[in-house]
Each structure stands twice: as C-alpha cells, then as structure tokens.
Image (cartoon, helix red, strand yellow):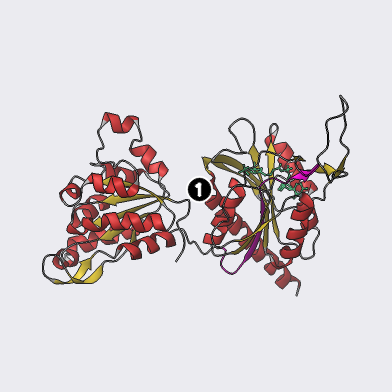
Amino acid sequence: MGTLTNKRILLGVSGGIAAYKSADTVRRLREMGAEVRVIMTRGAGSFITPLTLQAVSGHPVYQQLLDTDAEAGMGHIELARWGDAVLVAPASANFLARLAQGRADDLLTAVCLATEAPVAVAPAMNRQMWNNAATKANLATLQKNGVRIFGPGEGSQACGEVGPGRMLEPADLAGRTSELFSTGVLDGLHVVLTAGPTWEAIDPVRGLTNRSTGKMGYALAAAAMEAGASVTLVSGPTSLPDPERVRTLRVESAQEMYDAVLAHVSSAEIFIAVAAVADYRPVTRASEKAKKSAERISLELVRNPDILASVAELKPAPYLVGFAAETEQLEQNARRKLEEKKIDLIAANRVGADLGFESDDNSLLLIGRHGVTTLTAQPKTRLARSLIQYIAERYHAERRDQNSRQAHRR
Ligand code: PMT
C-alpha cells in the first residue's frame, strides 16, 4: 500500500445507504496523509449530512453546480484542478449511468468530466441492480474511458439480500486510492536526489545560504518513491519533514552534500540534482562568533566542488538530471549548463518574486538531446509526478537505445 502524503483527494458521495460510511472514508484518507474535500450529490443528503462530512474533512462540503457563491469561491473548474484524484464512494447505479453518458448536470459529474486527475468509483447497490445489463454496459464504458472501478464486494446487503454490490470498506478504498499514484515506472531502480540549500558557515552563528526551501526536491523524492524506486535524498538544511519511505540524509555544506552523494550514487541508475548548492564557501571558518570591528571587511571565498559535474564523470554514470534556476535567458543559460556539465536532461525554472524558490508552484522547461518540453505552472507535488514520469520514459528509452547499439556491435 502506498501513501497519500501531500495528495489532494476529492471524495464524491452519491445517494445510497453506503453513504453513511463516507465519514470513515474521509478519516482513512486523511490518516494516510491526504487533504480531502467532499462533493455530495442531491441524493447523498438523504443518507448523511454535509455537516458531518465538513467536520471530518475540515472543509465546507460542495453540493451545488449553479451556485454563484460557490462558483465565486472554488467553482467546478477550480475543484477539478485542485484534486490529484477523484474517488466517488459510494457510486450508485444512477451516478454510474450519468457518468458513463458524460453528463454534467450536477457538480460531481461536472467535476469528473472537467478533471485531468484519475477518477475512481466504488459501486454500491443491490445485487440485481449490479447484475443488470444496463449497469454492466455503463461500467464497460467507464472502464474504456479510463475510470478505475474499486469493487464492489460481496455479502449481506442493506436490503436484506446477499450477493455482489456491497461498497468496499473505507480502509480498502483509501489503500486503493493510494495505489492510483503508484505508477511502477521506476520499479527496481535506485534514485539519488539532492534538495534544499547548502549552508556555508562563516562562524558558529553566521553563514552563506540561499532561498531554496527543498519543496521541489522533496516532492520529486516522494514521486520517485511512488513510482517504485528506492530513493536516497541528500538534503541541505530545510524545515520539511523527511518524505515517507525515502532514505533522507541531512547535510549542511556543499562539501558534506558532495561526500554524501558520492558515497551513495554508485548504486544509482538515476541522479537528480535539485539542490541550490553554494558555488563558493568562506576560505576559513571562525571557531568563535566574529566581533564587529572595522567599518568595512571582506570575506575570501573558494569554489565548492560541483556535485553534478563530478557524478557525470563516474564510469558508468547514472542517468543525470540537473536543474537550472535562472532570472533571464532561461533556455540559453540552461542549455549551456546541460552541455558544460555533460548531463542528459536539464529542468530549467525561472526564479524571482513568487517563482521557483519558496513558492508552492513551479513551471519547468525540460531540455535534453531529444528536444524541449514545457511543464506548465502547477503545484510542485503534481509537477514532480509529471517530471518523474518524463524522466522514467527518457531513462528507459536511452537504455533501450544503448542495448540495441551494443547488440549491433556484437
Ligand atoms: O527548494 P525550492 O524552494 O522548492 O526551490 C527549487 C529550486 C528553485 C531551488 C530548484 O527548482 C532549482 O532550480 N534548483 C537548482 C538551483 C540552481 O541554482 O542551480 P545552479 O544553476 O546553481 O546549478 C545547476 C545544477 O548543478 C543544479 O542541478 C545544481 O544542483 C547542480 N550543482 C550546482 C553547483 C554545485 N556545486 N553542485 C551541483 O551539483
């Protein structure tokens, strides 16, 4: 079972007796780390109150499509963009029919149509309704359209009958929702990443650093883990918690980051350098706090080792991804770093007020031998999943090319 840390889940509740379990579903999703917002259909309100779901989710419950107040706040398109996944549980026979037809006559169906995120449904209905040919045809359509079907289970039903059609239990639904993010594209691979800033000490209390928070690198570490990799994250000083199931090594200076990376990267197939590493450090570090003295002082600096360029010199080198933070001439500057550091791919981001550093959102220009691709502005957590997918495709394509070249030579 995966995790739902940093995931935004939209829980749709349609009208059926199993809606009484929705409060528990919200709780289970949140226990796994998700932020949850609930959308109820009109029918759902007959089985559970919005107030209950508001209390357990910590957010107002969304019910109306054509409500000016709601649309002025988070309307159906914003909701559709907000969710990393949509889970409809319970999904009644009527809801499945409307979704299969592509209708958008209430908020929940409209959001399901408008989202780019994966949509999963947990059917819950009487066994005859489940076995009905119309329901079967609707499910086949939904599956063809990429909707995941969770369950249903078998057993005694609220109507007194026994058979298929019971909604899966909330804990099971939360587990399956987490698996929506487990792509497996990096199964069996070791990924090493750097993240955050470095701290170059001047004396015991002062140092040189930068505005990197580590958010981009930590999101990539989590996305690589979800994609099936074993992940080692070498992090400079940040206030972020260690990502789950990621071996996180905390370091301070560029030299310590270099040592930690070189100690672990030989077993890695992919190295991703996200850290904003200080290019220079003070030549000396005072052992006591320096006292204020002259009007003007100078600090002598010396170059730090280039971690990415050093890893690129290893034989064999892993697949190498660098980052470039630029305030101007994004593509030209990033391309120059790609060539100078002899790496496979560079992810360039514009930095400045509210961009790149510190912000929760980012956009990237990916430049490699095969061309240029843009990942548009979005939360770093989501951007990280797209970038990991992209890196996995490029890594596998290049390994295939290498293998066929070797086979050709033999
Ligand atoms: O941490 P956040 O607040 O989320 O911000 C994310 C970010 C803006 C820091 C990140 O997206 C980013 O752009 N990181 C690279 C920052 C940078 O300044 O790169 P650079 O141009 O100095 O270095 C180019 C590449 O070489 C980078 O991959 C860097 O990690 C690597 N490098 C640089 C110097 C050095 N001594 N060793 C290195 O490995």
Q: Is mark 1 within 8 Å of ligand 1?
A: no
Residue at left 59%, top 59%? 392
Whether residue 93 is visible to the viewer of this picture, yes or no, is yes
Mark 1: amino acid = Arg
Between residue 405 and residue 269, name the one nearer to us: 269
Image quarter of the N terminus: bottom left
Between residue 352 and residue 134, name the one nearer to us: 352
Q: Where is residue 170 shown, x and y percent of the image?
A: 31, 62
Question: In terms of image quadrants, where is residue 51?
Answer: top left
Question: In terms of image quadrants, where is residue 164?
Answer: bottom left
Q: Where is residue 338 shown, x and y percent of the image?
A: 74, 47
Furthest residue to the top? 295
| Image-based side of 170 in relation to 370, left or right | left
Q: Where is residue 337 shown, x and y percent of the image?
A: 76, 44
Q: Where is residue 16 shown, x and y percent of the image?
A: 18, 56
Whether residue 102 is visible to the viewer of this picture, yes or no, is no
Near mark 1 (Cα within 10 A), the count class, few <14, some 14-19 or many ≥20, is some
Residue 198 lies within the magenta run = yes
Between residue 203 and residue 179, name the one nearer to us: 203
Secondary structure beneath label 1: helix
Residue where numbered disc 1 is placed: 382
On screen, residue 163 above or below 134: below
Between residue 177 and residue 105, name the one nearer to us: 177
Residue 369 lies within the magenta run = no
Report the span colored magenta.
186-204
Furthest residue to the bottom? 410
On screen, residue 407 above or below 10: below
Image quarter of the C terminus: bottom right
